[in-house]
Amino acid sequence: MGLCVIILKFKLDNLSVLTYIPFIAFFGLLFCFHSGVPYFGPDDFTFRSFLGQLMQLNWDNLLIYRYFHWSSRLLIDCLLPIFCNLPVQVWMFVDSCLVLLMSALIPKLLISDFKNLDLKKQTIFNCIAVFLVLIFYVCAYAYDINFAGYITTSLNYVWPFVFALLHFHLIKEYILNNDNKGNNENNIILVIFCRKFILYFLVFFSLLFAISQEMILCLVLGVYLFIIFYYYYKKVKTPKIFFYGFILCVLMAVFVFLSPGNKERYLLTMMPNHLYVYQSSLIGKVYMGLAIFFNQLITKVDIVSYLFFAVFGVYVYGNVKSRFNVFSMVPFLILNLIYFLGFIQFQPLVKVLSEVRSSTIITSSMIPVMIYVVLVVFVLFSLFLLFREGKKFVSVSLLFSLVLVFFSQFSLGFFPVDFIHGSRWRIIYWAVLILLSAFMVYGLLEYDDDSNYSTDHNDS
């Protein structure tokens, strides 16, 4: 009994257990939800049958076959047969842990001095992260994600995003901010070597797993370009780790581009279902991807986008001292109006939305085009107000992130996706919007000062 008291006191004094209560509750909620979902879909059963082919040393090998006939996601494809054949409770536990990890990483990534905050503030920020990730989780898992299967979809979309967050967290926390305590406390070369080996293994494995997914690859490559340019702009020496990561991303991009499986899958998917997309020009494919994204935004109640525009409006309104700051709320108000008129079955709008919903192109009606133009114009105008207010780093970061995540949706015309079934291709888009929403919520609590970012990066 006395030992338990000592252990509990140590935890309370050193680990601030209160800050972990939101995560403990969230983990329990995740595990309960997992126990009620239909895990196995068509793709899950397909990968269950592939386990025997995983280690064959011939052309029937799963990874060789997938690379030449379907996909370049070899690392993900290697793990899928294993998880699909293990007891489903293993996937339940790992998936719950990774979704939980996503909520734990968000405040640590977005708040530079998170470790030095008091207990109350850490708990508040953790609660915010848990709430936002819960919304993402509901959208990603509770919609029609099971069209392919929970296990397959989570490994192909949710897990790579979490590993991308983990990759940048490890760099930020243990490489850029390394205080070399291990060198001071231990003079044992082997211990130091093992720690560094494990750290760099985790850094590059998490990166490799993340960029095995093409959309995540584009996002991470963009982030690396932004970081390298930022250091160059600040005239600060760029840490070598960023060049190593950038080179690995470029090599993976070449690998994806050369994969015959991606090209063959594109033909097989597009030819029978979307022949006009396959035959379209470059601009036509971008246009079609834009239409698909926009059609989903205005014809379905997109909770994550709705939340993002609400937070975006409040953030700009609260940080810009100008009579024009009220315009930042226009995108949110437009979505409110569209969703409300749809809810009350306002017939003129219902007719337009019905036409839009059944099409993979922007229809002849000018109403959807006008709504889209208004949304874009007011978002850009709001970012300009932020920039003029002196929050240059924040405005540029938001603009760059939005360009990346929206481009990932506009480029759907180039991907072998079925636009009619499933919303798997929106999971990464939702995840990025949740991350940006957390960034702005923390900013509203006065943790986005540009001078802080500059100081932190210069010190690094």
Image (tube, helix red, strand yellow):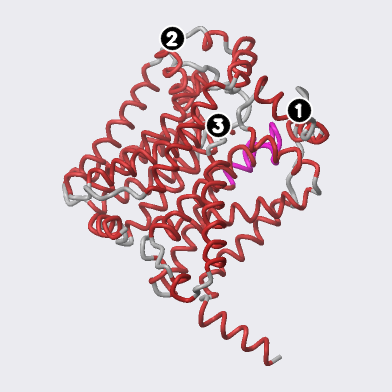
Q: Which residues are magenta?
A: 138-154
Q: Nearer the viewer, residue 361 or 148?
A: 148
Work out how far the residue at label 2 is from the one at label 3, CA to CA, in angstroms.
Answer: 22 Å
User: Most prominent secondary structure in the magenta stretch?
Assistant: helix
Q: Position of residue 50 (x, y in %)?
A: 79, 32
Given the image, on which type of amino acid does mark 3 rest?
Trp
Left or right: where 46 falls relative to 287:
right
Earlier-in-chain disc, 3 versus 1: 1
Quarter of the picture containing the N terminus is: bottom right
Residue 149 higher or lower than 19, as above or below:
above
Choose the circle earlier in sequence order: 2 or 3.
Answer: 2
Residue type marked 1 = Asn
Kind of residue indicated by mark 2? Ser
User: Which of disc 2 and disc 1 is earlier in sequence?
Assistant: 1
Residue denoted by label 3: 425
Mark linked to residue 281: 2
Q: Which residue is mark 1?
A: 61
